[in-house]
């Protein structure tokens, strides 16, 4: 074990600074504000610091380490060129308050990304400001809220979400002040149009839904759903977390949506190590565009003077939407993430559809391979599909309820068993509508070999006796972690008291 | 793009094994009437080389702060980030991981974030810190809603918070967006002519749910008055202090003068400015706020063998469990940037942080000294500044900044952007990267500007 | 510098525990008369920031080939190296390791080098490859001494090797330095006016220990005659072929036309030019040469459990065992650069290599086409060229290159540096990085040069 | 296991190239030279390639992974700034044949490094051309050879080396054509002056020795040795592999040497992952300088025209020594390595002495701590110092012969036991003069804590029963590797035959 706070060298610092400026009157802090006790930070030399974080990294699983079939998270390979681009001059040392003529490159990339996302989503205007999917949801729902306020439809106080929705959907709408109306799914995991029709009325501000849905099923009735909500005067919100299934094939616009968020860090491969950073642009139809947070990247023909610094035939500038809700992040969003995603987009360009096709191909192939292997080994009875379908989209769900009933093996047991096989586990217990759910999303960047081997190993786990599985994992840096202990014995920081 | 798709060329084989013929068969469930009829009207795929060439051309047209004397800050600060930080954070195991849902194989990031929590907790002087929010502005906004959740029941001014009038409008806007859903009323707190908080006016805030102030304040001022705020507003009103974390190397931690919540933009510790993001929001608080705070938290626990182990904890506050009753909607956060922060802090150590703070302070002080003797330039506030301060220039700030820009200097931030009445004020920022030459060039050009404006020697 | 020394500040404590008082006590064994009396007369220590600033300034004054149209090659070639290569090779586990003396904890590098051996072996068409020598020149030199070790006993021309007269003097000099200790006589092989090997003259070399030729040859020519060389010189004379590895994507592997040893400069696969080093030398051979070849070799083995495992093998050839009777004195080699090569090769795959070779060939061909119609310029050899070729210019090559340089073009390599009689010849190199615009600019400026030299349209 | 050659995707390549130039006449290879069968290289997509090499890296131990006390190799921390500098514009894309005015920065760094090394070594002229220590030895011995040839002293055909010398010393001299005369060490591990005097004569070209010697002992008689060799008309060669012990304290020049090599990759921290690249500059006294390989970096005042591109007050240029032996590497040596080492030098500057002091402090402290722990646990009798001394220099040796005799535990067993404790093992069985030798070099970049823990663990290994140790390591990716099997069943490349 390497413990950061056990490093207490007599050494001053792991980063020796140059002398710095001196001033005539010694620079001071007001006497009442002088720091009395310095932070009890550790003291490491650079060699020790490098070794500590190298050690930590070796105890962490990433896509580079192995297959990461975490459903709903689109853990695709992060192309290395993204990192090269993010380190080029002209991004790290750019301040968002610099004048426009200092930022033509940044603005043109922003513009290109807005434009590309508008096309992919079938929306009229995109903003790149939200920094994660959840913030995109919040932002779009805020726009919808202001839209209705401006129209005098203050009675629209409700947002409808299916019970299979991701937690951020209701949380984001609630943060805006909306009441949440949850509608149950049908037995086959799909949206219940009748249930929707029953709740959609003049109090409905919006419905939030993702398609393909969180079970990996395409909601074929989506236009009907849109119709119902629109007929009731509400707006349709598309949760874009599952965009990886549909790029170039269909779009929220075609399905009748009014607003949508992207999770660029998923679909467009922004590395979001350990939980972030993300980027959650939103796109909206024309009626909502005036409410978007500003500024947006826009362009026009340059003046003679401007053409000196223009990067191409256009002059790029910031543009403030007329009835903007204001800001959701203090600056222009996660510019560094947007640029990586721009690099990613450029790799596919008009061929983005191929990417989605392969994502769907891989998901279906894996689903098929798991069933095939299970049949071969006679353990097909231990799980059922989370939803009936001929073809899944980019992900699929399995219910481990049969294994639970027959052998006492839970979805979590299977997950831990997979860790022992060297895999990251699929998402478990989400969506809540599938009992003992495992949600599996391979993404397009996994090879057939990897999928075949995973299917075999998955089935091998199912053939493991319950006791062994309850004790899994055994090959990981630590064994099953006691989350209850963590919650009961809260230790949220290094207890200096004890160590002194 | 072929190089990113391992199964290119294997489509037929894979489809066949599923009893399918074409890729189309995978999409039979998508009705024709919602299908794109044609290829996306986008440019063609490019190779890595072509993308880099385009990126180099486009980004190369941006003007790097480092390429010229630059005095712009106003919330984001260019401090040097040691080489080891970049090289370690891009290790694939960190870079390509996601939220540590399976703690057994995510101990590295979990421990790093637990250490981050400790580093932040020690930095700000509060016992609890989460593992990052989106940025400084959302951290401040979420602090307000958190304060209302905690104090509303006992508050005499329910649903009400007070915020310094100096807070930049962009940040205020974020706060308003985050507060409006809970119908929170945001009132403002006045400041004295010298840029310090009007402690008299503050009394009004007692009985509200919370007070949000910054130290240093948006004018760069270290306001000694803040140490008396908690006494004035009392135990039932949250004192929320927004900090510039580097300053805490020499400035007292707000936790030590009564802050209940400390928030801040983490960027100056560990991360470049990057056009305004990704950043990371610091959020720390005292124990009473713990169960109503936003964001992820790591706890130290044990595994089944009793071995030290880390995992996410207190998740019942979060959206994936509590859904619409969650304390925040945040899911994807800024862990990787927070990790850079942790690495930077670990490298600096307490003495290194003090040195870094001192370098910032000294650079600011030196800039002030030189500009105070520059023809036509006036230092607006006689005060202790940390790393930025307002100057008054002849003519308009906007024109003056344009003039400086024409002469290859990023002169600072036009304060009228924030405070429309301050048409002739510029916020001048110095950091560890500011050199004497930079300051001299700025001073010389400001003197020229003054001359052009008719200020005589 | 403090940041690199974890025990700064602990000296006294550590000394005391050893019963010592001062640092001086650690050096009592060094007599006063061999001691420095004063501090080293060197500049003071610098911080990381200052070093980077200085490096940026100094290196920034170098002229990057990528910053202008550049046609210089002559042994080192700027091909694009994919981003993944750099990011993986700098992983600490690779970067900060050394020779894998303990195979149990060095399986990663050992396997990677075993794979490298396989990649090279397949590339050149020979069954054995080592895991790198210093560079192409030392690989060629060591091939000569190796050939003598193997063939000297049976050779009718003992201690004698033959080398193409076209080999650049710098490379010849390395060969001579490596050969003189074993008293090896190096004779040269003549070439025809069209740049191909004089096969008639080659007969003389039969009975010697070895023949060294290059494909493409130093004039960039793909010489079909080489496929008959082995027949001419016979089994008891080693055919050593020096290759440009990228060419082997489309050009026959020398192992398939009789080469006994293949060497080459590995740089164009995986590594930038880097001012001429670090590079990596390719060395591959047939089985009879195995036990007398230079350099480290990895073998696949098993561990005590019978599990697949890798380790260094055939070390009895090496200096640390065989000492002055070793087959080479090499110890530290170029593994990390060879690893970059392996990564690049793994990414390319056979089709990628073919594409890369084709791009080079096509760029060269296009350059030839355009220059062949450029006023005053003559293509010296009617031949198949891989990625470079000689042109004849009006006036002197040196003046012409200076003229091009004044106009922002790195026009190529002055062939009189190698062949003093070729005063008016320039070796023009194209790579995957050559653009049509580059070629047009070169052509236009060469035309201008011709005009200045009085060549009329 | 991840096997590169098992990857045989149908995918074309892991790096898609842009279309490239087209030409009027299709570019061709002569028909007889067209490649008939392409290399059986694997086919990996970028995601698979990244995962393969990440996996391999995790099976490799580096300094970043843990303590690496490999004697004679100076495995110090590689500061990360070195890598930043090596990636700045102006080095990767520099061609050594560019004209001097394109290379002023490179030349000035070369000049500064030559100058610094001259001062540190007390030599008159340094060349940076040799790319490793062994090549430096070869180069310097070649210069000595030509020096004597020029003086007509062709009878000097012998080079003297102590029996404790590194293998490269005799190998390099032999490669030049010299006969090797090995002289035995004294019982205390030091040089035997009498033995030296007995062999030094008019046939002696040079003596090669390192000081501190390979046992970590400073040869106090070094000036006497130099005197003996010089009196016999020979030259003194200093193997600089152990420079880390003496920088700023003493120099080969002060000790009477005529030539010296540096291992920049050791002393000046050029990362040499897996065995290289290195950099092995040599320095020589004036009499040998005319023979050095060229070109050298030199400088003078710039002309008016030159001052335009000059980086400072000087104009830098290449300089060819008068009687140069020619070249040992085709270009200017490992420029990329030199630049990293320049960055390293700048960090210490005139304070290089502190670095050496800490290297020696750490070595002595560790030696002391091992003895201390051994005494505490009662296992002192299991090893003896490789040489008697009060203070070691930057490294020290232990002989495990007592453990071997008493318990059948060899130095190799201890080494493998240390691998199980998470350490890289010290150098074993070198120098050959110490029976069952372990050669331990901690370097200055290890903390006291690391040294203390290592000492404890070392003693714990000694307390392990022999059987367990014979079976060690057990925690490593593979267990004890069968080197005999490897040599008997040579498998030096992937056997495609079997797998097809
Ligand atoms: C279906 C779905 N919706 C929304 C989100 C929220 O996105 P983010 O994590 O970027 O805030 C997620 C991400 O986890 C998701 O899976
Ligand atoms: C004492 C000694 N001399 C010479 C050398 C040879 O140096 P290099 O490996 O750089 O060729 C070494 C390195 O291993 C050594 O330890």
Image: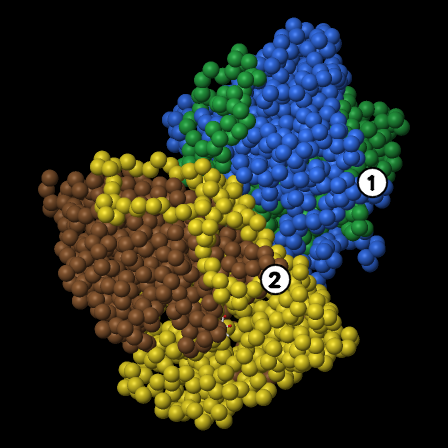
Chain colours: A blue, B green, C brown, D yellow
Q: In this view, does C156 lie above or below C428?
A: below
Left or right of D19 on screen, residue B234? right
Q: Which mark is residue C304?
A: 2
Q: Residue at x 28, y 44 (%)?
A: C361
Quick one: B349 or C147, which is closer to the camera?
C147
Residue A378 in view (yes/no): yes
Left or right of A406 on screen, residue B347? left
Left or right of C164 on screen, residue B352? right
Q: Which chain carries label 2?
A: C
Q: On the image, numbered disc 1 is attached to which residue?
A: A484
Q: Do labels 1 and 2 share a chain?
A: no
Residue D74 position within the rendered picture, expressed as x and y whole percent measured from the top left: 55, 68
Residue B357 position within the rendered picture, expressed as x and y whole percent measured from the top left: 66, 50
Asked whether mark 1 and ligand 1 are closer than 8 Å, the reply comes as no
Quick one: C373 or C335, which is closer to the camera?
C335
Quick one: D133 or C317, which is closer to the camera?
C317
Residue B254 in view (yes/no): no
Secondary structure at numbered mark 2: loop
C-alpha gap between disc 1 and disc 2: 43 Å
Tags 1 and 2 touching, CB below 8 Å: no
Secondary structure at numbered mark 1: helix
Q: Which residue is drawn at 66% across and 20% down?
A: A388
Left or right of C241 on screen, residue A280? right
Q: Residue at x 33, y 49 (%)?
A: C248
Residue A491 position within the rendered picture, expressed as x and y whole percent measured from the top left: 81, 46
Q: Residue at x 53, y 86 (%)?
A: D185
Q: Residues within 10 Å of mark 1 (few under 14, many from 20)?
A: few
Q: Mark 1 lies on which chain?
A: A
Residue A146 position within the rendered picture, expressed as x and y whole percent measured from the top left: 67, 15
Q: Residues within 10 Å of mark 2 (few under 14, many from 20)?
A: few
Quick one: B322 or A184, which is closer to the camera?
A184
Q: Is residue C309 above or below residue B444?
A: below
């Amino acid at each position: 074990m390497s413990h950061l706070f056990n490093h207490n060298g007599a050494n001053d610092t792991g980063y020796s600074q140059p002398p710095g400026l001196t001033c005539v009157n010694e620079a001071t802090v007001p006497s009442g504000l002088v720091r009395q006790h310095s932070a009890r930070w550790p003291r490491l030399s650079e060699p020790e610091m490098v070794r500590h974080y190298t050690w930590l990294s070796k105890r962490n699983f990433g896509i580079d380490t192995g297959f990461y079939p975490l459903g709903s998270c689109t853990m695709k390979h992060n192309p290395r060129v993204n990192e090269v681009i993010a380190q080029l001059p002209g991004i790290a040392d750019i301040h968002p308050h610099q004048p426009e003529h200092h930022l033509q490159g940044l603005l043109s990339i922003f513009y290109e990304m807005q434009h590309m996302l508008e096309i992919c989503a079938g929306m009229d205007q995109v903003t790149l400001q939200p920094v994660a999917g959840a913030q995109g949801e919040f932002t779009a729902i805020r726009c919808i809220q202001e839209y209705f306020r401006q129209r005098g439809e203050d009675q629209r106080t409700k947002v409808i979400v299916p019970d299979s929705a991701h937690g951020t959907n209701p949380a984001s709408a609630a943060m805006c002040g909306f009441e949440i109306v949850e509608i149950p799914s049908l037995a086959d995991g799909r949206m219940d149009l009748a249930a929707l029709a029953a709740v959609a009325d003049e109090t409905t501000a919006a419905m939030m839904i993702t398609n393909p849905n969180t079970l990996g099923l395409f909601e074929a009735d989506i236009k009907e759903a849109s119709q119902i909500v629109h007929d009731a005067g509400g707006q349709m919100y598309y949760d874009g977390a599952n965009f990886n299934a549909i790029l170039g094939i269909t779009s929220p616009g075609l399905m009748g949506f009014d607003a949508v968020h992207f999770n660029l860090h998923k679909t467009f491969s922004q590395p979001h190590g350990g939980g972030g950073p993300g980027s959650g642009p939103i796109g909206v139809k024309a009626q909502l565009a005036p409410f978007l947070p500003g500024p947006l990247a826009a362009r026009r023909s340059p003046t003679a003077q401007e053409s000196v610094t223009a990067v191409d035939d256009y002059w790029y500038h910031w543009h403030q939407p007329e009835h903007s809700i204001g800001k959701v992040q203090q600056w222009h969003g996660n510019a560094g993430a947007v640029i990586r995603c721009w690099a990613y987009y450029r790799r596919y360009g008009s061929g983005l559809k191929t990417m989605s096709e392969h994502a769907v191909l891989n998901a279906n192939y894996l689903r098929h391979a798991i069933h095939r292997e299970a049949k071969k080994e006679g353990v097909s009875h231990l799980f059922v599909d989370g939803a009936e379908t001929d073809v899944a989209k980019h992900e699929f769900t399995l219910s481990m309820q049969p294994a639970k009933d027959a052998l006492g093996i839970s979805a979590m047991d299977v997950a831990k068993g997979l860790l022992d096989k060297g895999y990251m586990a699929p998402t478990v217990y989400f969506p809540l509508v599938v009992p003992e759910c495992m949600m599996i999303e391979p993404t397009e960047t996994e090879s057939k070999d990897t999928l075949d081997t995973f299917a075999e190993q998955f089935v091998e786990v199912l053939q493991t006796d319950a006791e062994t599985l309850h004790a899994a994992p055994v090959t990981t840096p630590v064994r099953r972690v006691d989350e209850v202990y963590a919650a009961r014995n809260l230790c949220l920081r290094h207890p200096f008291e004890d160590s002194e | 793009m072929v190089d990113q798709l391992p199964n290119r060329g294997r489509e037929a084989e894979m489809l066949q094994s599923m009893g399918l013929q074409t890729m189309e068969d995978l999409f039979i469930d998508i009705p024709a009437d919602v299908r794109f009829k044609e290829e996306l009207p986008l440019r063609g795929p490019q190779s890595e080389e072509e993308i880099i060439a385009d990126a180099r051309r486009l980004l190369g047209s941006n003007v790097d702060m480092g390429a010229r004397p630059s005095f712009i800050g106003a919330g984001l600060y260019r401090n040097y980030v040691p080489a080891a930080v970049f090289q370690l954070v891009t290790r694939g195991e960190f870079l390509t991981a996601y939220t540590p849902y399976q703690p057994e194989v995510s101990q590295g990031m979990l421990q790093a974030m637990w250490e981050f929590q400790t580093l932040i907790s020690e930095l700000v002087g509060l016992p609890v810190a989460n593992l990052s929010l989106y940025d400084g502005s959302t951290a401040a906004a979420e602090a307000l809603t958190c304060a209302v959740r905690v104090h509303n029941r006992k508050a005499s001014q329910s649903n009400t918070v007070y915020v310094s009038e100096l807070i930049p409008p962009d940040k205020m806007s974020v706060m308003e967006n985050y507060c409006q859903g809970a119908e929170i009323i945001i009132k403002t707190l006045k400041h004295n002519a010298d840029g310090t908080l009007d402690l008299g006016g503050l009394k009004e805030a007692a009985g509200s749910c919370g007070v949000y102030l910054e130290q240093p304040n948006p004018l760069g001022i270290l306001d000694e008055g803040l140490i008396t705020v908690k006494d004035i507003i009392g135990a039932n009103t949250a004192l929320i202090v927004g900090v510039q974390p580097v300053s805490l190397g020499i400035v007292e931690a707000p936790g030590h003068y009564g802050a209940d919540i400390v928030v801040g933009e983490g960027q100056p510790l560990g991360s470049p400015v990057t056009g305004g993001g990704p950043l990371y929001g610091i959020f720390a608080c005292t124990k009473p706020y713990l169960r109503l705070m936003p964001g992820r938290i790591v706890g130290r626990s044990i595994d089944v063998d009793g071995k030290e182990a880390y995992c996410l904890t207190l998740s019942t506050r979060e959206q994936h469990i509590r859904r619409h009753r969650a304390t925040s909607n945040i899911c994807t956060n800024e862990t990787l940037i927070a990790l850079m922060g942790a690495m930077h802090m670990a490298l600096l150590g307490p003495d290194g942080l003090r040195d870094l703070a001192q370098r910032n302070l000294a650079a600011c002080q030196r800039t002030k000294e030189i500009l105070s003797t520059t023809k036509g330039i006036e230092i607006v506030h006689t005060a202790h500044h940390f790393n930025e301060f307002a100057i008054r220039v002849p003519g308009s700030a906007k024109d003056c900044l344009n003039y400086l820009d024409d002469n290859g200097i990023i002169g600072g931030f036009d304060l009228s952007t924030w405070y429309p009445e301050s048409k002739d004020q510029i916020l001048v920022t110095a950091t560890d990267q500011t050199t004497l030459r930079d300051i001299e060039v700025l001073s010389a050009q400001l003197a020229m500007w003054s001359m052009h404006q008719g200020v005589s020697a």
